[in-house]
Image (tube, coloured by chain):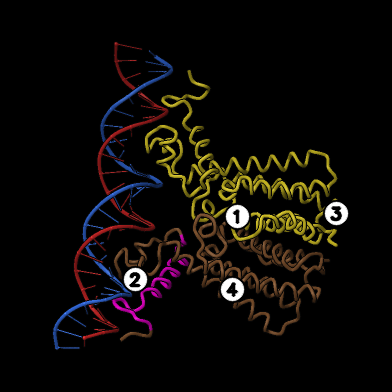
Chain colours: A brown, B yellow, C blue, D red
Amino acid sequence: MSTLKTQYHHGDLNKSLLESASLIIKEQGVESLSMRKLADTVGVSRTAPYHHFKDKNALLCAIAEQGFCEQEKILRDLRREKNTAEEGFKKYVHAYVEYALQHNETYDLMYGRTLWKAGNPSDSLKAASKQTFKAWIDWVEELQEQNILPNSNTPLRIGQTTWASLHGLARLFIDGIYLDKGDLSDMIEQMIKNLCSTST
Amino acid sequence: MSTLKTQYHHGDLNKSLLESASLIIKEQGVESLSMRKLADTVGVSRTAPYHHFKDKNALLCAIAEQGFCEQEKILRDLRREKNTAEEGFKKYVHAYVEYALQHNETYDLMYGRTLWKAGNPSDSLKAASKQTFKAWIDWVEELQEQNILPNSNTPLRIGQTTWASLHGLARLFIDGIYLDKGDLSDMIEQMIKNLCSTST
DNA sequence: AAATCTATCTTGACAGTGTCAAAATTGCGT
DNA sequence: ACGCAATTTTGACACTGTCAAGATAGATTT
């Protein structure tokens, strides 16, 4: 009575672990995710998870990787929707920040030191992030051609800096730096002004 | 034979702890600072530090607080130096990023989730950060008057967004997100173009 | 259907963490 | 010299991640 893959004792521990871990992280923050509590929640012994993920780092990498897929999907969907180039970009800026705030713990795994510096980003995580970044740069190139983003520099460079700006904005909020949440939408608007070539 | 304050057994444990902790953090990262190893390094028992800092969080807050003092000093010194307004601003952008990269672990404590979100920022830390931020906003106001920064919004808002941009840039590098360090100075220059009102 | 194989899971163990409570030390003012 | 209070230590507890060895049981082969 297996679903598809060969699942012996549990059913699909791998998947259960990912889902449960994501939930715990979302609700209680990544620092209160312990492998032991996770195993317990899923109803399995302490070390069972280690047969599906090499270690905690690997589990977190897998979660972050999902995040990149979601983010890339958001980007692609928004590009497909036929907006004005300008509208499309503005929507993405909002969507980017919104995603970061709504999935703040995942976002932190995707772009934070936990995995990239303190931890050990898996190859597939690196690949996923690279791919998402590439999709972004491609769009930037188009936005430059459409004169939405400045042509004063290469797509890579413009992509890097606009990304950095959005990232910084998102981070300040999700990391709990004392900023009034009411300022957010104003800040986003101002940020857009900074980034667009049609800055008045 | 005490220096000033009443130091009984150690000499000045408080200071020693701060210095030693800062060093460990700088050399090995904040995640490999343990209260026990720290105590050991300083040559004192496991729990001795707890009579000088309520807990690990408090110790880290104290370190972060020092960071804010340093950063504010950089800002004030740069303002005092009589540069052109534009030159002054550009120098500060460079100095900001440079500080972040050079003191990356302290920077993370100052502006990261460790203290602000996962932890519990002390009142004096909050005060220090607020004061530094205030100094920044004051300068922004002046820079707006001098037409270096855009007047399209309030000093607060412009201050927040430019800060966020610099923060994002710094974070990407210090968190080990895969960016080529060789791109840094180019990125800084492009960032300046984005931020200044005289963007071409 | 029985035996074997192998993926999966569990038990036991170790070294490490932060931090509390209670006891011990020790310098200072009297 | 004595006691007070600041300072430090010892012992303990509940956690953490993860390794090594054994148990279990579905799948495969005979």
Q: Amino acid at mark 2?
A: Val
- The label on residue A178 is 1
B147 lies left or right of B30:
right
Chain ID of residue with mark 1: A
User: To which residue does mark 4 refer?
Assistant: A71
- Point out the tag, 2 or 1, that comes first from the N-terminus: 2
- The label on residue A42 is 2
User: To which residue does mark 3 refer?
Assistant: B147
Percent coordinates x, y for residue A160 in the rendering:
69, 64
- Mark 4 crowdedness (10 Å alpha carbons): few <14, some 14-19, many ≥20: some
Q: Nearer the viewer, mark 4 or mark 3?
A: 4
User: In the rendered structure, does residue A139 fall within the stretch colored magenta?
Assistant: no
Please provide the residue range marked out in magenta: A5-30
Could you tell me which secondary element the residue under label 4 belongs to?
Answer: helix
Chain ID of residue with mark 2: A
Q: Amino acid at mark 3?
A: Asn
The structure residue drawn at horizontal position 52% and vertical position 47%, both measured from the top left corner, is B29
Reply above or below: B56 against B167.
Answer: above
Instruction: Give the main secondary structure, helix, strand or loop, of the magenta stretch.
Output: helix
